[in-house]
Amino acid sequence: MSMRSQVYEWDSTGMTVATQVGQRTSIFVGGVGNNITKPAETTATEFVVIEDIATTPSLGCWAGVADNTVIRGLLVDATVGTAGLAGPRSYVQVRINTTDYFLDPDNIPNDGIPGAASPYPRSINFQPAFNLYPDVYVLPGQVWDVLVTFYNSGAFVTTTSAAGELMCFVKYTLYDGPDALIANKLLEMGISINPGNVDWYKRSLLQAQA
Amino acid sequence: MSMRSQVYEWSNLQTSSNQLRRLSTDQPAQVVGNREYDIFTGGIGNNITKPAETTATQFIVIEDIAASPVISGAVQIRINTTDYFQNPDVTNMDGIPGLASPYPRGANSTLDLTAVDATTVGSENILKSFDLYPDVYVLPGQTFQILYLTPSGTTTDATSTEVVSCFVKYTLYDGPDALIANKLLELGVTINPNNVDWYKRSLIEQQQRSRVAAAAGGQA
């Protein structure tokens, strides 16, 4: 099992909304929601290809929508700073070592991919407009993180978040051992790293030996 | 990381005008009818520090644009001073309607502006009927704008106006990959990550062949 499709789902359950609103939070080690034991990193014999990221969607609407209205499963709060918006207004950014992946056109890092463009979960009401292509490569020895930021505190029923109110999703493929070496080789050759191309490289090695 | 998928989302939510960062205190701002708003530096909603432009070592390929499907909003691309979308008689137009390229995909197109609750918000799911293909190229040194326009506009009252959004998805080629993108453009080959990789591979293969030929020549 040296090429493995992996996912990580983060749910903000129990998060204090007022503390985290407008703050970047790591979905791995941010201290809220479900976390892992240490920052995500690749060892010398691992190669990670991030293929999809997504977060809870939001929907702009009429600012006169009544307080506590639910539109398409998303809560609307009619107070200042939250009027006219259903959902948490959340964004998700990828960071490799200390470099943010998504930038504004003036080359300044931004909040990342909006949940409205890459929703999680996907539904008829919220469909993806964004496809993470080309993929994001995490080379051996690099530390990576996925950071979520939300701005609409009115999307939460109480002062602490409940299950499903703010979520993130990341899908990646982990190449380990010999397959990580092949992934590095493909990178040198300018070939996209995916399981099909790794298998192709293995077959071409076998054919060269025969 | 010299080829990067990028997005920019704009909405008329702000705490103050010319705002660079999103804030948790943002509220809807008025969008005046029949006025083009640059989503990067238009003064309302979230903006960036300077007009969007490519440096001498950058190449941008715009792959998707979209706008809220409400209040007849439309979105146009302007490269330097030239609008991309035109009428058949080569006159100016508003751009791609939000109904054709909705953001978010699956959003509703109508709102009852007098008494909105969960039951009166439009129940339809607008899907896209427009695909930005071929892509739009922004060459090194060019300035580009994404312009949002709605004929009707929104109201002035922050508690009764409409929240509208725009979305643009593009790929940024930087450094050597921007040079390759220029080369592909000269060759008439579509610029996408696959073709940039293909060009790199062909360069490597060419070098290898030259090396083998040189070694063979040395032995002879």
Image: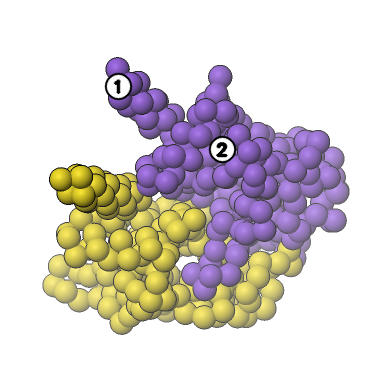
Q: Residue at x 37, y 60 (%)?
A: B177
Q: Secondary structure at mark 1?
A: helix
Of discs 1 and 2, which sits in the foreground? 1
Colour style of the rendered protein structure: by chain
| Foreground pick, A169 / A64 | A169
Q: CA distance from mark 1 to mark 2?
A: 25 Å
- How would you rate the neighbour count of disc 2 (Cα within 10 Å): few for under 14, some for 14-19, many for 20 or more? many
Dot 2: element = strand
Question: In the rendered picture, chain B carries what hue?
Answer: yellow
Residue B76 in the image: above or below residue A149: below
Q: Which residue is mark 2?
A: A47
Along the line of sight, the residue nearer the viewer: B77 or A124: B77
Left or right, B170 with reference to B89: right
Q: Which residue is mark 1?
A: A207
Give chain A's shade.
purple
A87 displayed left or right of B215: right
Tag 2, which chain? A
Place of residue A86 in the rendered image (x, y in percent of width and height, measured from the top left): 64, 51
Q: Quadrant of the N terminus of chain A?
A: top right
Q: Residue at x 68, y 42 (%)?
A: A41
